[in-house]
Each structure stands twice: as structure tokens, then as C-alpha cells.
Image (spheres, helix red, strand yellow):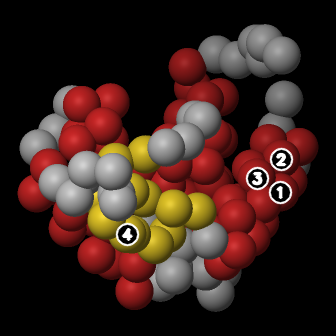
């Protein structure tokens, strides 16, 4: 579904979305953490630290730090890959799915209320 927007409208949407996120009770995620979370939930699994690092174009320690925070928030979980103990599998959680469902609702709500 393509949405036609001018750059100024896209920036206004981003601003209003950021403001709504700051104001709500949900945890604040950095853009990097949000990109990782969206990748884990929207791209087909399995997801590994190594695979996420390649997909996002960052180092494995960057992914690990972000996952540490998201793990504390219970948005994702990690486990060792039994087939290859060097790999760490990133798994979805109920809390993470609910977080993104609410975020999707928020995006739709903010977009609907933007001035035309």
C-alpha cells in the first residue's frame, strides 16, 4: 500500500509519532533498538545476532547491547542454537508482539490525525 506524502508531511508524522511515544507509558526504544525489534518481528525467523548485524550493517556487539536492553524489557529473548552453539537465536515474546501491536495502532492513529 503506497502512501503519497511530501517530505514535510513525513517529517511531521515522524515528529508526532516520537512525541506520542515519549508521552505514553511504553518503554522508549532507540531507533537502532526499534529497527532490530521490527526486523525480528516482521522478517521471517530464525534471527541470530550475526544475521541481525549483517542485516542492519552494524557489529555484533552493537546488536548484543541493544538486545540486552530489549531482553530486560522482555521484548525479545535469546537462546543458544543447539545445532551450532556459536549462534545465538533471537526469539519473539508475547510482550514484544503486544508492544509492536500497540506501536502499529499508534502509527495509524497519528497518521490519521495529521493535518492534510
Q: Can residue 32 be seen in this view?
A: no
Q: What element carries label 2?
A: helix
Residue nearer the viewer, 96 or 14? 96
**From the viewer's perspective, is residue 25 above or below residue 62?**
below
Residue at x 32% of width, y 41% of height: 52
| Secondary structure state at the residue bearing disc 1 | helix
Report the quarter where the C terminus lies: top right
User: Which is more N-terminal, label 2 or label 4?
Assistant: 4
**x, y (%) of residue 45?**
55, 42
**Residue identifier under label 2:** 108
Report which residue position mark 4 lands on: 79
Q: Can residue 25 be seen in this view?
A: yes
State the residue at coordinates (70%, 17%).
5
Cβ atoms at labels 2 and 3 below 8 Å apart: yes
**Answer yes or no: do the residues labelled 4 and 3 have beta carbons within 8 Å?**
no
- Identify the image quadrant of residue 7: top right
Give residue 104's mark: 3
Question: Spatial distance from mark 4 to mark 1, Cα to Cα?
Answer: 30 Å
Instruction: Check whether the beta carbons of the residues at disc 2 and disc 1 lie within 8 A of each other.
Output: yes
Q: Where is residue 76 in the image (x, y as percent from the top left)?
A: 49, 69
Q: Which mark is residue 105?
A: 1
| Element assignment for label 3 | helix
Amino acid at each position: 500500500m503506497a502512501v503519497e506524502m511530501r517530505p514535510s508531511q513525513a517529517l511531521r508524522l515522524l515528529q508526532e509519532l516520537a512525541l506520542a511515544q515519549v508521552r505514553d507509558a511504553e518503554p522508549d526504544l532507540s531507533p537502532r533498538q526499534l529497527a532490530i525489534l521490527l526486523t525480528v518481528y516482521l522478517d521471517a525467523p530464525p534471527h541470530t545476532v550475526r544475521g541481525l548485524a549483517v542485516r542492519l550493517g552494524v557489529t555484533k556487539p552493537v546488536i548484543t547491547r541493544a538486545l540486552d536492553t530489549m531482553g530486560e524489557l522482555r521484548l525479545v529473548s535469546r537462546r543458544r542454537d543447539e545445532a551450532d552453539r556459536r549462534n545465538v537465536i533471537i526469539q519473539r515474546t508475547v510482550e514484544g508482539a503486544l508492544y509492536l501491536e500497540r506501536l502499529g495502532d499508534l502509527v495509524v492513529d497519528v497518521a490519521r490525525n495529521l493535518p492534510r
